[in-house]
Image (cartoon, coloured by chain):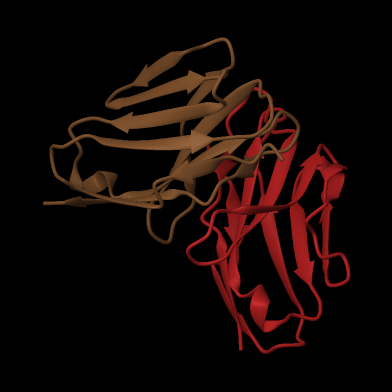
Chain colours: A brown, B red
Amino acid sequence: SQQGEEDPQALSIQEGENATMNCSYKTSINNLQWYRQNSGRGLVHLILIRSNEREKHSGRLRVTLDTSKKSSSLLITASRAADTASYFCATGDYKLSFGAGTTVTVRA
Amino acid sequence: EAGVAQSPRYKIIEKRQSVAFWCNPISGHATLYWYQQILGQGPKLLIQFQNNGVVDDSQLPKDRFSAERLKGVDSTLKIQPAKLEDSAVYLCASSLDGPGGTEAFFGQGTRLTVV
C-alpha cells in the first residue's frame, strides 16, 4: 500500500515553539502531499512535494522528502494557537490515500 | 472560485434506513473522491472517479454503499441499509487531475450519525 503513516500520533507544544512530524510510506511515489484539518472541518492542502525535490517551503512550513528512506517530515516554525489541528500526509499516484494523522496542540 | 459543496451538513438516521449525500465539485475538476472519516482516524478512500469513470472503489462496501457521478460533474453517495458503524464524516474532494500531481480540495463534509 502507498498509504503513509504519521508519527507521532499526538504532539503538544508551547506557542512559539517548532513542531515536527514525520510520515513514512512503503512504495515508491511520484509525489507526497501534506494536509491540515481543523476540528470538525474539511481538509486543507498545505504542500505537495515531488519525488525529485528534497525540500520545499511555504511560509512557516518546511517539508522534506527522503525517497531513499521513504519518509517525509513537516516542520511548523514559530507555532501559533491557530496551528492546532490534525496533520495528514497523503500519497498515491493514481488514488489518494491518507495516514492516521498527527494531532498538534499549541498551548498559549 | 467556488469550493466543493456538500449537502446535507448533518444527518441522523436509524439503523437499516437509507441515506444519500450529494457533492458538487469545483468546476472543471476531473477527479472526484469520497472519503469516510471515523472520529480519531484518517480519511479512508471509498471511491475515486476520473470524469464519470471509477478509478478505485476497492474499499467501498458494495453490499450497502453505492456512488455515481452524473455526467462527470455532481456525485451522490448512498448507504442502504445503514449500520451503526457507518457513523462518520463523509468527505467529498475534487482535483483538477489525478493525485499524481495536483492537490485535492475538500468540502466541509457530512456528519452522519446512525442510531
Above/below status of A88 relative to A39: above
- Is B81 left or right of A105, judged from the image as shown? right
The foreground one among A31 and B90 is: A31
> Residue B90: percent from the left, percent from the top?
62, 61
Tag count in the figure?
0
State the image coordinates of residue B80 (x, y, percent, origin top left). Answer: 81, 77
Q: Is residue B90 above or below residue B83?
A: above
Q: Position of residue B64 (x, y in %)?
A: 84, 72
Q: Nearer the viewer, residue A107 or B28?
A: A107
Image location of residue B78, percent across then percent down = 78, 68
Q: Is B43 on the left or on the right of A65, as rendered?
A: right
Q: B71 or B111: which is nearer to us?
A: B111
Spot the residue most to the top: A52
Above/below status of A97 relative to A107: above
At x 66%, y 24%, the residue is: A29
User: Compared with residue B75, is residue A30 higher up or lower down, i.e. above or below?
Assistant: above
Relative depth, front residue between A43 and A89:
A89
Give the residue at x 40% y 24%: A63
User: Residue A5: which quarter of the image?
Assistant: top right
* Position of the C terminus of chain B by quadrant: bottom right
Q: Who's the residue at 72% across and 43% down the image?
A: B32
Q: In the image, is A33 to the left or to the right of A85?
A: right
